[in-house]
Image: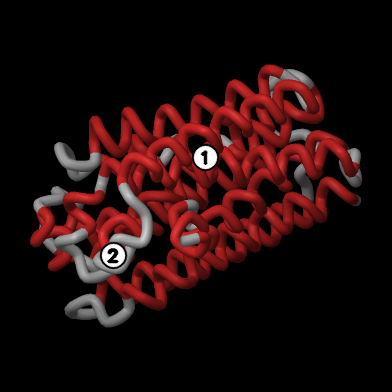
């Protein structure tokens, strides 16, 4: 049963979110952040994201049973009952809010809560089953962690840096998720989820993925120019990685079928992690 509750939080997804939160922490600190603040953000962020994911399991249990990728999730397999899963998710967010508020500040706590509310009500309930642009808008929820880290250090978000970090994740999310959705197209179609490959087709989706990587390139240049504290290391790293990302998506676009979708998806994960590791290094230096 304990394993079931852990699975509800989607630990692998949380790990990437924490790297982005650390980016905000280090950049705002201009060096190594206060250890207590760092622990508070990591613990609070883990609980908030885990709680949001648990609530998502509760809301999506009817479609999870129809998809091979999700057919063994705790609520589908019977490891955890629906109402306890919902309560668990809500409690995790209450505890996360309290920890961030009392040990960091109200702004960071509120941002973490906003991310959960957006993920649950805007993405999962409002968009996921109704529009192929679900992940474009819904991706805002996963873009908030670096802002939480920034706010925990500074007590505000009155700087272009946290918004630029937000934008990086926001515009990274569609090509990342659409690459995955190419692989899972049949699953989404079976579950009645209007993901872009289901509605617009494979080739159109590949064109959208390619286009978004160019938006990322423009965004990287803008970030280097506008974000105080991000300079040569981030600039070289981010622009080089984005050109590699463009190369992956160009090969995906030109090749028939979806044979390169998995490689593109996996690179997109490494891409975001490496970008925010560069942010952390810039913060230290």
Q: Which residue does the numbered mark 2 point to in the structure image?
A: 77
Give the residue drawn at x 32%, y 50%: 81
Helix, strand, or loop for circle 1? helix
Helix, strand, or loop for circle 2? helix
Quadrant position of residue 68: bottom left
Which mark is on residue 61? none
CA–CA distance in space, label 2 to label 1 = 30 Å
Give the residue drawn at x 62%, y 60%: 273
Q: Is residue 137 depicted above or below 135 in this figure?
A: above
Q: Which residue does the numbered mark 1 point to in the structure image?
A: 143
Residue 210 appears in the figure? no
x then y, percent, for residue 223: 64, 40
- Residue 32 placement, left or right of 170: right
x then y, percent, for residue 128: 23, 41
Give the residue drawn at x 14%, y 48%: 194
Give the residue drawn at x 59%, y 21%: 110
- Residue 12 placement, left or right of 124: right
Local crowd at mark 2 within 10 Å, few (<14), some, or many (≥20)?
few
Local crowd at mark 1 within 10 Å, few (<14), some, or many (≥20)?
many
Q: Is residue 19 depicted above or below 255 in this figure?
A: above
- Residue 246 placement, left or right of 25: left
x then y, percent, for residue 227: 71, 35
């Amino acid at each position: 049963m304990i394993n079931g509750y852990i699975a509800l939080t989607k630990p692998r997804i949380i790990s990437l979110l924490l790297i982005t939160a650390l980016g905000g922490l280090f950049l705002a600190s201009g060096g190594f952040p206060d250890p207590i603040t760092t622990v508070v953000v990591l613990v609070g962020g883990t609980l908030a994201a885990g709680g949001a994911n648990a609530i998502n399991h509760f809301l999506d249990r009817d479609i999870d049973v129809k998809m091979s990728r999700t057919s063994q999730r705790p609520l589908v397999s019977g490891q955890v009952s629906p109402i306890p899963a919902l309560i668990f998710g809500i409690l995790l967010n209450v505890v996360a809010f309290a920890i961030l508020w009392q040990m960091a500040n109200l702004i960071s706590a509120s941002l973490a809560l906003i991310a959960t509310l957006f993920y649950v009500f805007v993405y999962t309930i409002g968009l996921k089953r109704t529009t192929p642009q679900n992940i474009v808008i819904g991706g805002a929820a996963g873009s908030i962690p670096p802002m939480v880290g920034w706010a925990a250090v500074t007590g505000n978000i009155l700087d272009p840096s946290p918004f630029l970090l937000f934008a990086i994740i926001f515009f990274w999310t569609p090509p990342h998720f659409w690459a995955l959705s190419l692989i899972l197209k049949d699953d989404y179609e079976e579950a009645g989820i209007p993901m872009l490959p289901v509605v617009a087709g494979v080739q159109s989706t590949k064109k959208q993925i390619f286009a978004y990587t160019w938006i990322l390139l423009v965004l990287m240049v803008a970030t280097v120019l506008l974000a105080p504290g991000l300079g040569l290391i981030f600039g070289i790293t981010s622009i080089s990685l984005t050109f590699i990302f463009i190369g992956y998506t160009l090969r995906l676009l030109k090749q028939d079928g979806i044979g390169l979708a998995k490689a593109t998806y996996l690179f997109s994960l490494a891409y975001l992690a490496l970008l925010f590791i560069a942010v952390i290094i810039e913060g230290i230096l």
